Image (cartoon, rainbow, N blue to C red):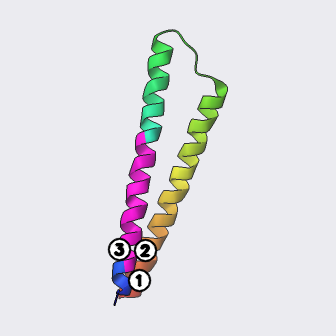
Amino acid sequence: MVKLKEIMANKTVIGLVLGQILSLLITSTGFSSSELARRGLRLATTEKAATDKSLLIQRAEGEAESKYLTDLCFACH
């Protein structure tokens, strides 16, 4: 039988992995933008908007994960 702690641990790991993937995508977008700017090409407004949106999503995801872990910690005590 699967224990509740195992399920929570798996969700936490999945959340952390997805957060890391999102961070990698945001970093690569920033790097690409910098490289294009260095070569004299301007970053399209839509690309900047997409990057800003990704940052907002990542921040919200981090806050939700933090709240979840805090609640989990209080539930263990």
C-alpha separation, residue under disc 1 versus residue under disc 2: 6 Å
Between disc 3 and disc 1, whose residue precedes?
3
Location of the N terminus (image quadrant): bottom left
Dot 2 amino acid type? Thr
Residue found at x 39% / y 59%: 16
Name the mark on residue 52. Answer: none
The reply to whether discs 2 and 3 touch (Cβ–Cβ < 8 Å) is no
Left or right: residue 39 compared with residue 46: left
Dot 3 amino acid type? Ala
Q: Which residue is mark 3?
A: 9
Q: Nearer the viewer, residue 77 or 43?
A: 43
C-alpha separation, residue under disc 2 versus residue under disc 3: 14 Å
Name the mark on residue 74. Answer: 1
Q: Which residue is mark 2?
A: 70
Give the SS element for disc 1. Answer: helix
Residue found at x 44% / y 18%: 35
The image shows residue 24, relative to residue 1, as above or below, that is above
Q: Which residues are magenta?
A: 7-24
The image shows residue 73, relative to residue 63, as above or below, that is below
Q: Residues within 10 Å of mark 2 (few under 14, many from 20)?
A: few
Where in the figure is residue 21, as x and y percent of width and height? 41, 48
Location of the C terminus (image quadrant): bottom left
The reply to whether discs 1 and 2 touch (Cβ–Cβ < 8 Å) is yes
Residue 5, picture quadrant: bottom left
